[in-house]
Image (cartoon, rainbow, N blue to C red):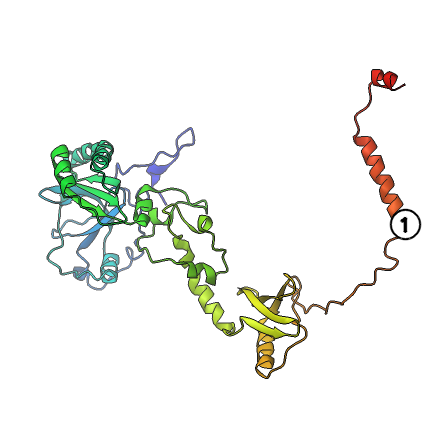
Amino acid sequence: MGCSGCSSSAGGSPLGCKSNGGCSSGSCNRLNVHDWLANLPFANPESACKIVEISFNNGSRKEYYRNSSLQIYFKGDMVAVEGVSGFDVGMVNVTGELVRLQLKKKNIDEGNTEIKKILRRANDMDLQKLKESKSREPEALTRARAIARQLKLNMKLCEVEIQADGRKATFFYTADDRVDFRELIKLYAGEFKVKVEMRQIGARQEAGKVGGIGSCGRELCCSTWLTDFKSVNTTAARYQNLSINQTKLSGQCGRLKCCLNYELDTYLDALQHFPDDADFLETTRGNAMLIKKDIFKNLMWYVLPDNNKQYPLTIDRVKKIKALNKQGTRVEELEPVDVTTGKMKEAEPEFVDVVGQISLRSLERNSKKRKQKEQQNQPPRRRDDRRRGR
């Protein structure tokens, strides 16, 4: 939900406030957070949380700062905070009791004295320095990649973030193995005249910084709202009866998609009603093998060894067959259900009487129709061709 500055122009293209004003919605921020506790009254206003969440670089990085002054900051305000031997400029993202909940979730003590402070509200000079520092980042990234390539380091630089006052630069990189960048830091410090910090990130964090559109047609979750990256393995795909295809299950980061974990708990709860020891069913025609489970229709699909036909069985039918197998009895028919109607299918006959089903007249009728279609599809012959034929 954007503010009035995000309205469309006469040509239909969105204008966007671009954080030029105090955007209270924060819609221009990449990892925007809705403060659902902002309008709730509290008994003791003095016990309100003094920690404020500040976002940097359009929401790609967030940190917590202490508001030790009496100044009240709101979402979207640009503030100057303590940096490394200087100051940095960021946007207020979350304030109030919601910050206290996030601190508890991340195991951060609210009374920690190491939390840096908010200096002041950003003035025009601070915003001008921030703009100049951000304009240096693309050129610094290109030059930094060239220097790393000259040293033949097995690493990939993803992003360069320069502090607002231009005294410090953070280089985000990805690497498979440990990288010795002691010589690289010396070259970066001499080239850019800043204090250098190297920070390694994973492939998922890299995709979140770059951004993009997923196969679902929406923006990547890691670049819009997802901040906690949980491990994803192929077991989640197997529980959901998905084909193990790396091209379809992998995201833009090259890892398995994070959305595989979204519905996993629902599948695990539904699979509790299915029998665990029903991978094989003993029949007179052989052992039927389980190939998949449908939690929406509560069906279990089996295949017999003599053909590739799939037989959907209900959970009760599978339990009855397993009970008979434990007694040493092999069933003759699986009694599958009709998926469209949900009723039991009739037993298939061993042979079909086809006597009198096909007559000669029907075959003659089909041959005449075929000849008429062939004559209609043939192109008309020219007069010269007819004379030559004569």
Which quadrant would the C terminus be assigned to in this image? top right
Q: Is there any visible trace of residue 299 in the rendered image?
A: no
Residue position for label 1: 360
Q: Residue at x 50, y 60 (%)?
A: 241
Q: Residues within 10 Å of mark 1 (few under 14, many from 20)?
A: few
Depth order, front residue of 226/78: 226
The residue at the point 47 percent across, 61 percent down is: 238
Percent of width and height locating residue 228: 31, 55
Q: Say if 107 sits above or below 31 in the image.
A: below
In the picture as drawn, the residue positioned furthest to the left comes out as 85
Q: Is residue 205 left or right of residue 143?
A: right
Camera-side residue: 227 or 252?
252
Residue at horizontal 85%, vertical 42%? 367
Task: Please provide percent x and percent y for residue 76.
Answer: 25, 44
Q: Secondary structure at mark 1?
A: helix
> Residue 31: x, y in percent?
31, 48
